[in-house]
Image (cartoon, rainbow, N blue to C red):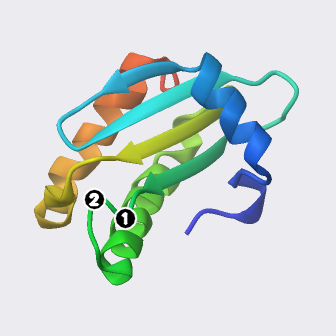
Amino acid sequence: MISRKHRFHGYNSLRRTYRNGQTVRGPFFAVKALPNPGRDSYRLAVVVSRKVHKSAVARNRMRRRLYEVVRQLEAKIADPYDIVITVFEPNLLQQPAKSLTEQVKKQLHEAGVLPRA
């Protein structure tokens, strides 16, 4: 789990990111990112609808897996960004950790959150 300072608080901050953020869509999830110079670090939210999977246990597992991948990439996120990852594919649960990490890296690079290596 990511630390408390990297979480969104309140619905309006998510709304701002949804309206103005740049979207990068992949096979399992979409990443919306928006620079936020008013903060000193990034904020992250993972949204998994009940339409994706009926089981709360499965939705929470998807959420935890994505939080963990971003937490491992935390040191590479230099600028303060608001990031919302929206899951739309239930097959995310069957993905191996390595391919999930690569997919998150790829989409964060395309969104401009991670610098090119």
The answer to whether residue 95 is left or right of residue 11 is left
Residue lying furthest right in this view? 38
Q: Give coordinates of residue 42: x percent, y percent.
A: 68, 39
Residue located 55% across and 69% down the image: 1
Which amino acid type corresponds to the residue marked 1 in the rendered image?
Answer: Arg
Which element is circle 2 on? loop
Q: CA distance from mark 2 to mark 1?
A: 5 Å
- x, y percentage for residue 34? 63, 22
In the picture provided, is 33 more to the left or to the right than 87? Answer: right
Image height check: is 22 above or below 97?
above
Nearer the observer, 17 or 73: 17
Instruction: Give the number of the disc on residue 52.
Output: 2
Residue 117, can we see it? no
As drawn, 52 above or below 55: above
Q: Which residue is mark 1?
A: 50
Determine which quarter of the picture holds residue 7. Answer: bottom right
Q: Amino acid at mark 2?
A: Val
Residue 58 occupies quadrant: bottom left
Q: Is residue 19 visible?
A: yes
Dot 1 lies on which element? Answer: loop
Going 41% across and 44% down the picture, which residue do you hit? Answer: 86
